[in-house]
Each structure stands twice: as C-alpha cells, then as structure tokens.
Image (tube, grey):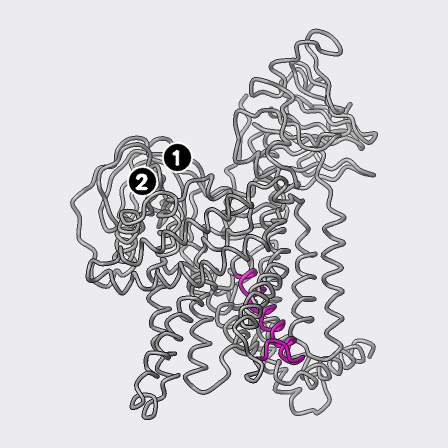
C-alpha cells in the first residue's frame, strides 16, 4: 500500500509538471532514454540481448493498462517505458557491433589489409585497415579493423590500396587509472579492434579497386586531396587550421598550436561540430534567401524561405561529408537537418521541442554517444542557448525598434549578443570540459569574443566560397582570405593561451556529480514555471562533488612499471620521468595537477635503483614526502598507515605481513606462504597484499590513505562487458 501511495504521489507530481509545461513533454523521451542507457552501461555484466525488449514490452502493456484509469500511474509508467526503450537501444546496439578486440599484444609480425581511412600527419600518417590478415594470429582472433601509425618515409598511398607492413599490434588501452577514459569501449563501438605501429616501409600490393558504393573510401581520398589543396594555397599554421575547418583533419596542426587553442578555450573551433555545421547551413540559408529575393518574380511566385532551407540542408550535408562524416559530425548534421526541415514544413525551427526529437533519434541510433563529451557538450550548449534566448525574449531583450534603430545600436546589440552567446555556451559546457579534460580556460570569454566573430563572419564564409570555386580551380581566391582569418584566430589563441595561469587544472568529479548536474540543468532549462529553480540543486550537488574530490595518495600502473605518490606540498612524485609519458600526463590532469608539478623520487627509471647523493639514512636510502626508498623498494608512511612497494623478492619477504598494504611488483603467492588468500589479497587480518598478478587482472590501482585504506581498481567499474579485454591468466613459474 505504501509503495502504491508513493507511486501515486510521484505520478501526480509528474502530471502536474507536464501539465504546466505541456509543450515541453517531448524532452521526457530523451531524458528517460538517457537514464536507461546510463543504467545499461553501469551493469557489471552483459544482460541478454532481449532484456531491454522485454522491459520495453512490459512498459508498453503497463502504459496501455494505466491509460484507461484516469489519475492513475500512467505518467510514471510512461517514464519507465522511456527508460526501458533507452536500455533496449543500448543493448541492441552493443550486440549489433562487430567490435572484436585483440586479446593480447602481438610480436613483430606481418600485417596485411585494405586502407579504408588515410589520415596525414605533420610527421608520418595513420591508416585504418579492414580485411585484415595478421601472420601471428589465427583468423578467429583477428579483429575486423586495425589502426596503424606509420613511421618514417612511406610510399604514396591512398584509401582503397591493399598494403603489407611489418608492425606490432595491441589491444586498445584500458583506463590508465580508476575513473579514466575507457578507450576500449570507444574503440569497440568505433569498430577498431587493435591499434599499433609500423616497423619499416609499407608495400603497396595489387588488389581489387574499391567499387563505386564504397563511399567512405572515396570520401577519405577526397578529403586528403582537399587538405593538400588548402595547404598548397595557404600553408603554415594557418593552412593547417584552415584544412581542419574544411576537412576535419586536425592531425596537420602542430602540437604547440593545439595547446594554445586548448589553453585559450578555443579547442571547440577545431572540432567540426554543431557550430560549424550551423554556420555552414546559416551562411547558405541567408545568402540563398537574399539572392532569391532579389527577383520579384521568384519571390512572389515561390516559397523563397523553404527553397533556401532546402539549399542549406544540401550544403550542410555536403559539408558534413567533407568533414569526414564522423559520429560528432553526424549528430551536428542531424540537429541542423531537424531545424531546416521544420522551416520547410512551416514549424518553428529553433526550439527545445525540435532539439528533443533530435536527441531522441541520436540516442536511438548511437546510444553510446551519451557517454562522450561531444554529445554532452553540444546538447548542453544548444539547450542552454535556446532557453537563455527564450528567457531574454520573454523580457523584451534583443528587440529591434524600427523607430529608434541606429547603426551604433545595432553594433552594440551584436556585441552584446556575441557576449551573451559566449557566456551561456561557456557556462553550459564548462562542467563537461572540467569532467572530461580537467581544465577550465580562465580567459575563454575573451578569446571567444575575438575568435568566434572572425570565424563566423570571415573564415567560414570563405570556406563555403572555396567549395564553389574548387571545380574551376579558383579556390585560392577564397582560401587566401580564409588564411588571413585563420591567422587572426591563431593570434588570439596564442596571445591569450600563453597568458600566466590561462587555465585552471582541477581534479575530476565523480560521475554521480555530473549526472546530478545534467538532470538539474535540464530541469532548470526546460521547465517554465518557478518549479524550474529546483534544478539549481543539481548544480549545487555537482559543486559539492567537485569540492570533495581529493587526489589519491598512491597510483600504480597496471604493469607495475610506473607509480606516483601525491606530494605533501602539491604535485606528484613519480618513480620515473623517462617512461610512461602519456600515462603520467593522464594521472596529473585527472588529479588536477600540471605537467610542471611532476617530480621524480628517483633518477634512472626504477623505483629504487639510484638513490640521492646525500641520503638521510644510510648509503642506500632516500626519503621525501613520507616516502623512504632503498634498493629493494619503498615505504610510504602517511596518515598513520604504512604502504610498502616491494620491487624484489627479498623486499617482499621482509614487508610481507608488516605493512598495512604491500604492493608487490613480483609474484607474491610463493613468497608469502603463511598468508591466507582472500579475494586476491594475502596477509593477516589487517594487512593486504596486491601483487603483479592482481595488477594484471584488475588494472591500475589508486590508493587513498584516510580514515581507512581505500583501494580503487580500474576494472572495478567496467565489469565483464563485450568491450572489456580480459587478460590472459598468468601462471607462476616454478
């Protein structure tokens, strides 16, 4: 009875909210689907493929039954149905993907296949191969697609060529630390089963030419040729940035320029997204509408606005193809298409209702996109901007009074509009940037105030003009001016990005904090009545989650080759600065530190191979920040706890059972015979041991020494899912 009463209360509350926001009800569908998708990816093991369909079927029957009883549980059951649909979409998507992942690293071997995607780099190139044949693997173990980085001088090649090369392959990397980016899951849904690099020159083989229907192969070649023509017309950093805006190839941009864009908060300009697709569609729409309206006969006899929307739709589709038709680009085009089609059928194009339907389609087709920053940031910005401008319009802002219209006032309104748009979009996307990339650009508003107008009013119109001139070989007439605009954008990025403390690096908040922010932000932006203010609770929860985050005291990599100890004065102390650069940088950013905050407690790449010139205690020991090392390993004493890192069997024998936690970089099962094994840990009741086998099985670990010892493993949140590579069991040597 109590449950039934609670259900009726919740149903009445949902009914009240829906009744007060009747025109916003479509948002219940993508929100419910998003919850269902999130629940699916949180499962520790893969459910049967029919589980989602079964839940959706039960939800439909329940909704139909509840519909016949006014004032019943229909709204609550309907929300549950939407959740079941999201769960079902995610499950079906997972089982429909051929994402076979390589189980373990291969030795140097011969790799053959067909290039389906070719990406030029400033130095070298990268290819994606299908029809893969790996000499060191049997066909059942060979992934459908592999991605290779080609080193050194290579022959001319293109997408569609069949190639042979010697190289090494490995599985896509697991998270480098607990809560880190899951590249294995990303690769699984991208169809990439292995990554690797070449060792020597590629040999182009004779093979069948790609058919006319292999549009991705032909598109890849077209994009490469476009990038070459852009670089030939402009050259330098401006040419690389212009090529990225036209073709989506960011690989040509030098790393210092990319860093400047990130530090200035302008990285979004280099990723083909809703901004670029929207600009392309908007430029063509307004240009076509103005040109068609110049003829009175056309303007009076034909629906000029609808014709312009159709031409803009074609332009957006073509630009999305030239940009690579990547998943983020597809999402951006879909949103633009929904808006333009709404204009063509005499519906309001830019509205939250249209955005809700676009999100529903994307979540149904690509449910995994919910977890990525691209989907989250693009929809967060779009929802916030629409809600913000609706709020401003309802209060009479941005209205042009024809009787009091002056050019100066128009310019002021434009500047205010750019500032308002930049502020809203920056505020909406900042939490997601912080969560995924651990940094916030302090001067992002200033940089965007310069770069966005230049991009919108100069760079992108020149890019659209270059497409029209390319068939006639006259693209340089548009590309050269485009390069001038790109130079201005680069100038703004470098000047602002190189300012002192241009970025604030902060640790990652827990996922539940981001979920609270999303739900609260949607509640705040979508609803209209004063009940919308309740959404601020989600924002406060996210802020509290961020404030409560503390960096772990110790992190150890999955192979045991790198460890980091949190310094008592800030930053991290690493066992090595010679190896594991990518892993080290990932750990630092995730903990909210900069690269310059990294120090080493040793000098030669080991935990305790070389000691300080003047050690505090004995000739073979060094102590810093509670960490004391000798030739056998290290002891960390902090917060009343003792953690031992045993690098040798002798050190392990000495530390076994004495430290509160022992991390053995050697197998421990035969060296601690008196201990009892309990779930992968050995030792007395108050002691635990994690050895090399445990690291191999569970991935990188993070240790926090507080009121109790907290150990988080990278595998803890991943479970046994199709995209999780299960390591092969290690057998100890006798």
Using the image as rendered, state which of residue 696 and residue 228 is in the foreground: 228
- Judge the density around disc 1: few (<14), some (14-19), many (≥20) Cα neighbours within 10 Å: some
Find disc 1 in the rendering and name its residue. Answer: 106
Outermost residue toward the top in this view: 619
Q: Which residues are magenta?
A: 375-399
The C terminus sits in image quarter: top right
- Tally of numbered discs: 2
- The circle drawn on residue 338 is none
- Report whether residue 51 is seen: no
Residue displayed at 63% across by 71% down:
388
From the viewer's side, name the closer residue of 118 and 668. 118
Label 1 element class: loop
Quadrant where the image shows the N terminus: bottom right
Q: Which residue matches tag 2?
A: 134
* Mark 2 element type: strand
- Image: 249 above or below 320: above
């Amino acid at each position: 009875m109590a449950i039934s009463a609670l259900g009726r209360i919740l149903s009445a509350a949902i009914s009240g909210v829906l009744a007060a926001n009747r025109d916003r009800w479509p948002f219940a569908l993508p929100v419910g689907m998003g919850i269902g998708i999130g629940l699916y990816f949180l499962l520790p093991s893969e459910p049967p493929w029919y589980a989602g369909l079964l839940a959706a079927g039960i939800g439909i029957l329940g909704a139909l039954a509840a519909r016949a009883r006014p004032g019943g549980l229909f709204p609550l059951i309907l929300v549950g149905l939407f959740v079941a649909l999201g769960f079902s979409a995610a499950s079906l998507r997972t089982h429909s993907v051929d994402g076979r992942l390589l189980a373990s690293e291969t030795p140097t071997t011969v790799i053959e296949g067909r290039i389906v995607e070719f990406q030029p780099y400033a130095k070298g190139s990268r290819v994606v191969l299908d029809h893969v044949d790996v000499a060191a693997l049997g066909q059942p173990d060979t992934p459908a697609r592999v991605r290779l980085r080609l080193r050194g001088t290579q022959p001319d090649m293109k997408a569609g060529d069949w190639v042979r090369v010697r190289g090494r392959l490995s599985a896509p990397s697991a998270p480098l630390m607990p809560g880190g980016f899951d590249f294995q899951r990303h690769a699984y849904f991208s169809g990439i089963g292995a990554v690797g690099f070449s060792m020597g020159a590629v040999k182009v083989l004779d093979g069948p030419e790609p058919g006319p229907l292999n549009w991705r192969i032909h598109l890849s070649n077209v994009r490469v040729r476009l990038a070459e023509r852009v670089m030939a017309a402009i050259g330098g950093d401006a040419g690389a940035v212009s090529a990225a805006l036209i073709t989506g190839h960011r690989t040509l941009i030098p790393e210092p320029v990319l860093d400047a864009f990130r530090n200035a908060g302008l990285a979004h300009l280099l990723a083909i997204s809703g901004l670029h697709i929207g600009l392309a569609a908007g430029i063509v729409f307004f240009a076509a509408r103005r040109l068609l309206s110049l003829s009175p006969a056309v303007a009076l006899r034909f629906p000029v606005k609808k014709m312009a929307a159709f031409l803009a739709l074609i332009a957006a589709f073509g630009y999305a193809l030239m940009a690579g038709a990547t998943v983020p680009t597809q999402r951006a085009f879909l949103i633009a298409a929904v808006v333009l089609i709404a204009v063509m059928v005499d519906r309001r194009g830019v509205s939250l209702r249209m955005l809700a339907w676009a999100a529903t389609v994307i979540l149904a087709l690509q449910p995994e996109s919910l977890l990525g920053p691209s989907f989250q940031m693009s929809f967060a910005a779009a929802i916030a901007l629409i809600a913000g401008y609706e709020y401003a319009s309802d209060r009479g802002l941005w209205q042009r009074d024809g009787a009091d219209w002056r050019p100066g006032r128009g310019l002021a309104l434009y500047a205010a509009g750019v500032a308002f748009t930049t502020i809203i979009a920056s505020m909406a996307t900042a939490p997601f940037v912080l969560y995924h990339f651990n940094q916030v650009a302090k001067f992002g508003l200033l940089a965007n105030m310069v770069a966005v107008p230049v991009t919108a009013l100069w760079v992108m119109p020149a890019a659209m003009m270059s497409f029209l001139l390319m068939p006639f070989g006259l693209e340089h007439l548009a590309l050269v001016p485009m390069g001038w605009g790109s130079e201005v954008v680069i100038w703004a990025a470098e000047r602002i990005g190189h300012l002192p403390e241009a970025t604030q690096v902060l640790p990652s908040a827990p996922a539940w904090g981001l979920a609270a922010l999303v739900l609260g932000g949607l509640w705040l932006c979508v609803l209209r009545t004063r009940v919308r203010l309740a959404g601020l609770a989600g924002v406060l929860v996210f802020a509290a989650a961020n404030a409560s985050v503390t960096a772990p005291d110790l992190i150890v990599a999955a192979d045991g080759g790198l460890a980091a100890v949190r310094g008592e004065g800030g930053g991290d102390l690493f066992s090595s600065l010679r190896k594991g650069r990518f892993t080290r940088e990932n750990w630092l950013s995730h903990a909210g530190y900069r690269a310059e905050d990294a120090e080493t407690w040793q000098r030669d790449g080991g935990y305790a191979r070389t000691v300080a010139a003047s050690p505090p205690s004995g000739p073979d020991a060094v102590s810093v920040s509670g960490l004391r090392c000798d030739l056998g390993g290290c002891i960390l004493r902090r917060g009343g706890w003792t953690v031992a890192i045993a690098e040798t069997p002798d050190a392990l024998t000495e530390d076994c059972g004495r430290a509160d936690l022992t991390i053995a970089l050697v197998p421990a099962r035969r060296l601690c015979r008196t201990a009892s094994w309990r779930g992968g840990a050995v030792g007395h009741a108050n002691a635990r041991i994690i050895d090399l086998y445990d690291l191999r099985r569970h991935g990188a670990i993070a240790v926090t020494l507080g009121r109790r010892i907290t150990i988080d493993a990278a595998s803890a949140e991943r479970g046994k899912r199709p995209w999780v590579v299960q390591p092969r069991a290690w057998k100890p040597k006798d």
